[in-house]
Image (spheres, helix red, strand yellow):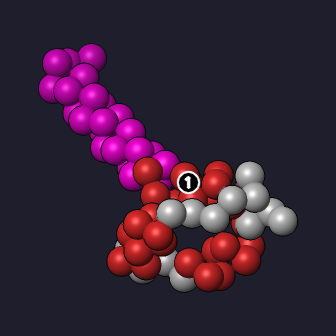
């Protein structure tokens, strides 16, 4: 394996990790909060709305009473 191949694979893995962190930071955290039976903070609600999510639909799907 050449060094350029190694660098390309490293960059690819970093991009994957960034996508995972982005998921965890908003949507994943919200789902986790709802599954514990809690409501998400208003700031998170607005962040999800701005990202284009239908927050009411997500809450109805994942909120555990």
In-image side of 48 versus 1 (left or right): right
Residue at image position (43%, 51%) is 25
Residue at image position (36%, 77%) is 50
Q: Position of residue 34 (x, y in %)?
A: 68, 60
Q: As rendered, which of 31 and 36 lies closer to the eye? A: 36
Q: As rendered, which of 17 and 54 lies closer to the eye? A: 54
The residue beneath circle 1 is 28
Q: Label the magenta part by its dominant secondary structure.
A: helix
Residue at image position (73%, 77%) is 60
Q: Is residue 11 above or below residue 47?
A: above
Q: Is residue 64 above or below residue 45?
A: above
What segment is highlighted magenta in the picture? 1-24
**Count of marks, rendered view:** 1
Residue at image position (41%, 45%) is 21
Q: As rendered, which of 18 and 42 lies closer to the eye? A: 42
Residue 7 shows up from this direction: yes
Residue 5 shows up from this direction: no
Mark 1, secondary structure of its residue = helix
In-image side of 32 versus 19 (left or right): right
């Amino acid at each position: 394996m050449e060094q350029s191949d190694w660098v390309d694979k490293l960059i690819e893995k970093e991009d994957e990790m960034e996508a995972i962190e982005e998921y965890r930071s908003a949507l994943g955290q919200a789902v986790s909060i709802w599954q514990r039976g809690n409501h998400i903070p208003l700031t998170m609600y607005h962040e999800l709305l701005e990202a284009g999510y239908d927050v009411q639909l997500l809450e109805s799907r994942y909120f555990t009473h």
